[in-house]
Image (cartoon, grey):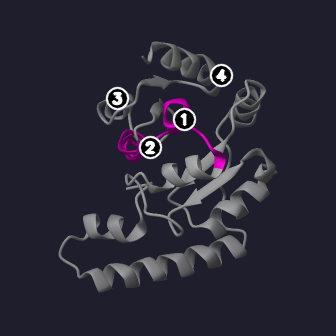
């Protein structure tokens, strides 16, 4: 369920409860999570090679953005905690746009940056990321170190799947060259 808007995740997990109950669960979850974050009980480490991978993509001239199921408050806290706020030219969150797999976050990111669909690549670790890319008619690269397996990512629309951050620049170049 990671990557889906909370109300949708709760609806899938608890199909017999009402939409109002899902919203109450979402609100309670957010309240508890915020309290945990404020008290220092939330750890969100970077994946190995993340910082170097971002640098390699920037060095290749890519504009970097985030499209996440997190709320803006949580995303900003995470990026600031790791000193990464200035790396991204657009931040798209599920509290300000439709959640995944709806294409809204990617479409907004492209509008904000002036990026064309054919030059936009969604990099993600869930099938919802791949479906969002497909729904936005962009390219998609799955990463094998996250929540969904390689086969699931490919079935959901990944043009390729990489095993490590160092493979991203080459993988992106290969799928761009392969596109008509």
Element on which disc 2 rests? loop
Name the residue that disc number 3 marks. 154
- In this view, the residue in front, 116 or 43, is 116
Mark number, residue 166: 4
Front label number (2 vs 3): 3
Sequence order check: which comes first, mark 2 or mark 4? 2
Residue 104: x percent and y percent?
A: 45, 56
Q: Are marks 2 and 4 in contact (CB under 8 Å)?
A: no
Number of numbered tags placed on the structure image: 4
| Circle 2 residue | 147
What's the distance in space between the residues labelled 3 and 4, CA to CA? 20 Å
Earlier sequence position, callout 3 versus callout 4: 3
Q: With 36 as the anchor, is 54 left or right in this view?
A: right
Which tag is nearer the camera, tag 1 or tag 3? Answer: 1
Viewer-side residue, 16 vs 133 = 133
Magenta highlight on residue 83: no
Residue 40 lies, in percent from the top left, at 72, 69
Q: Quadrant of the C terminus?
A: top left
Task: Report the Cα–Cα distance between label 1 and label 4.
Answer: 19 Å
Q: Position of residue 27 (x, y in %)?
A: 47, 82
Q: Distance from label 1 to label 3 (Cα)?
A: 18 Å
Instruction: Give the Cα separation between the discs numbered 2 and 4.
Output: 19 Å
Farthest left residue in view = 16
Q: Which quadrant, please, contains the N terminus?
A: bottom left
Label 1: few (<14), some or many (≥20) within 10 Å? many
Range shown magenta: 113-136
- Say what secondary structure mark 4 lies in: helix
**Which residue carries the number 1 mark?**
120
Residue 162 against residue 48 in the figure, above or below: above
- In this rendering, the answer to whether 34 lies above or below 47 is below
């Amino acid at each position: 369920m990671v990557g889906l808007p909370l109300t949708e995740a709760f609806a899938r997990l608890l199909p017999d409860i009402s939409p109002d109950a899902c919203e109450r669960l979402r609100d309670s979850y957010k309240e508890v999570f915020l309290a945990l974050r404020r008290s220092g009980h939330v750890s969100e480490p970077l994946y190995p090679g993340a910082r170097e991978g971002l640098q390699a993509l920037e060095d290749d001239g890519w504009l970097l953005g985030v499209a996440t199921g997190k709320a803006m408050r949580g995303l900003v806290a995470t990026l600031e905690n790791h000193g990464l706020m200035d790396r991204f030219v657009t931040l798209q969150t599920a509290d300000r746009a439709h959640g995944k797999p709806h294409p809204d976050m990617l479409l907004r990111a492209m509008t904000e940056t002036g990026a064309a669909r054919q030059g936009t690549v969604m990099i993600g670790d869930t099938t919802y990321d791949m479906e969002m890319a497909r729904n936005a008619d962009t390219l998609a690269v799955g990463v094998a170190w996250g929540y969904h397996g390689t086969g699931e990512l490919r079935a959901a629309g990944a043009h390729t799947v990489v095993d490590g951050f160092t493979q991203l620049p080459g993988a992106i170049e290969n799928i761009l060259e392969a596109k008509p």
